[in-house]
Image (cartoon, rainbow, N blue to C red):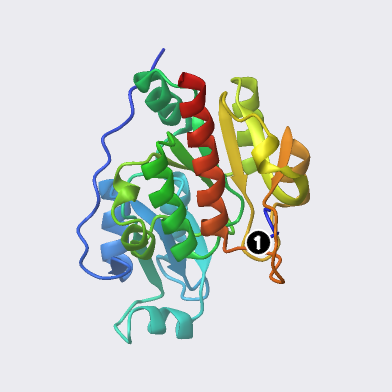
Amino acid sequence: MDNINNKKRPRERKAAPQENDEQLIIGRNPVTEAIKSGMTIDSIYVNPEAGGSIGHIITLAKEQGIVVKDANEQKLSKMCRGASHQGVIAVGACAEYAEIDDIFAAAEEKGEEPFIIICDEIEDPHNLGAIIRTAETAGAHGVIIPKRRSASLNYTVFKTSAGAASYVPVARVANLPAAVDELKKRGVWIYGTDGAGQDYTGVDMRGAVGLVIGSEGFGMGRLMKEKCDFLLRLPMAGKITSLNASVAAGIFMYEIVRQRRAAKG
């Protein structure tokens, strides 16, 4: 990561049982029935060359908005430790994904300005879990992640978040820049974390805030950076010029908490 530098009530979000680290559903019939039942599925891994009913499973998944990822036989066998997968494995989600409206409803219910964390391609599930955990403790109203090139609500995220993923609405969107545009239309100021930004302590963040945390290796993407109203950085006094994404996110989140408390007197 760059040196960072009609009203709707929130849904009740329950964690799925923790049977294993990934909560895998293995094989064509089990995956098909899981999709049809409406079970919360994070993603489906398929070997498109497996033939047969694989095409039908892909169609069902896409109709439900489930992310479908191609995987070869070797990857599938490794995921299920050699069990008979028949070319398809589904990964259960640890909590239901929310909608952006749910995040605004959570803020309205508390009588607070929206405080939203936007994760731009945070691919390490430990980082995403830690960010969600800090977001919950800091009183953020929700987290937004992209469908692609991002960690998702799997069981590693759930464990790392210490269960916070059950309490913080996490919205997964197909187009993150478009989601940011929606936030801006609804009165949210967007603060990006980037080494070229202003010292974070000198920036007023007391209103409706969308805080963008960039990817571990490359920071925010160019388009996301252009969408930001403000760019923030952390001063670096040592020889290391960057921080872990979740550590940096925590510092920024608690600066927002500090400013909001100071404003209340």
Residue extending farthest to the top is 6
Give the percent coordinates (x, y) of residue 69: 51, 64
Left or right of 94 in this view: 200: right
Above or below: residue 151 compared with residue 255: below
Above or below: residue 194 compared with residue 88: above
Mark 1: secondary structure: loop
Give the percent coordinates (x, y) of residue 75: 47, 81
Give the percent coordinates (x, y) of residue 128: 47, 57
Give the percent coordinates (x, y) of residue 29: 27, 65
Q: Residue at x 60, y 35 (%)?
A: 179
Left or right of 250 in this view: 37: left
Would you identify the image quadrant in which residue 192 lies?
A: top right
Is residue 147 visible to the viewer in this orientation of the structure?
A: no
Name the amino acid, label 1.
Met
Left or right of 246 in this view: 236: right
Residue toward you, 164 or 13 = 164
Q: Residue at x 50, y 32 (%)?
A: 115
Mark 1 neighbour class, 10 Å CA radius: few under 14, some 14 to 19, many 20 or more: many
Q: Residue at x 59, y 20 (%)?
A: 186
Would you identify the image quadrant in which residue 242 lies?
A: bottom right
Left or right of 99 in this view: 159: left
Above or below: residue 46 compared with residue 171: below
- For the image, the number of numbered tags is 1
Is residue 81 visible to the viewer in this orientation of the structure?
A: yes
Q: Residue at x 26, y 64 (%)?
A: 30
The N terminus lies in quadrant: bottom right
Disc 1 target residue: 1
